[in-house]
Image (spheres, rainbow, N blue to C red):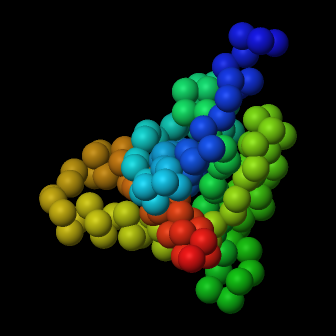
Amino acid sequence: MANDPLQAKASTDTYLGFDFGTKKIGTAVGQTTTASASPLQTIRSINQNPNWDIIGKLIAEWRPAGLVVGISRQVDGSDNPVTPRMLKFCRQLEGRYQLPVFQQDETLSTYEAKQLLFDEVSVSATKLWAVQDQLAAQLILQTWLNDRTQKDY
């Protein structure tokens, strides 16, 4: 399959981040060379299942070296009700796209994203719904990039 966009050479420093939810998934892109992440888009789920068409298009467009997924757990480390679905999403990403999937603790990332929005500007509920998951994905990916950069020194 020489024309398969997923077979094109992956960028060695680009990673996609995901804030998984059953209704929507926030996405972000980041690079290890700049150690920075940016929000991409919020993907609406289809009957509480990921929209694999859109995810596939993002992976084809960005050709990441790997994927980073936020995993939510209780403060004591035990699973939240959504944790098993997040872990399943990780396995599905790895199986579908044959890319390494890194799990990142996402405790409070959506809360932090909302706080960032409220601190910066007054945001309508509709706008908040649309962008909070993108910002949460950005925070997840940024945390992973920061941890990775610190380990390289």
Residue 90 is left or right of residue 28, and the answer is right
Toward the left, the furthest residue is 122
Quarter of the image where one finds residue 118: bottom left
Rendered view: 84 above or below 46: below
Across and down, in percent, residue 84 comes to: 77, 61
Rendered view: 144 above or below 99: below
Q: Nearer the viewer, residue 44 or 102?
A: 102
Rendered view: 141 above or below 62: below
Across and down, in percent, residue 142 comes to: 47, 62
Across and down, in percent, residue 14 comes to: 56, 45
Q: Residue at x 29, y 45 (%)?
A: 126
Q: Nearer the viewer, residue 130 or 2?
A: 2
How many labels were placed on the picture? 0
**Which image quarter is the C terminus in?**
bottom right
**Which image quarter is the N terminus in?**
top right
Across and down, in percent, residue 3 comes to: 72, 10
Residue 33 is left or right of residue 46, and the answer is left
Quarter of the image where one finds residue 77: bottom right
Rendered view: 82 above or below 90: below
Q: Residue at x 49, y 54 (%)?
A: 33
Q: Is residue 100 visible?
A: yes
Q: Nearer the viewer, residue 142 or 106?
A: 142
Toward the bottom, the furthest residue is 76
Q: Nearer the viewer, residue 128 or 102?
A: 102
Q: Is residue 54 visible?
A: no
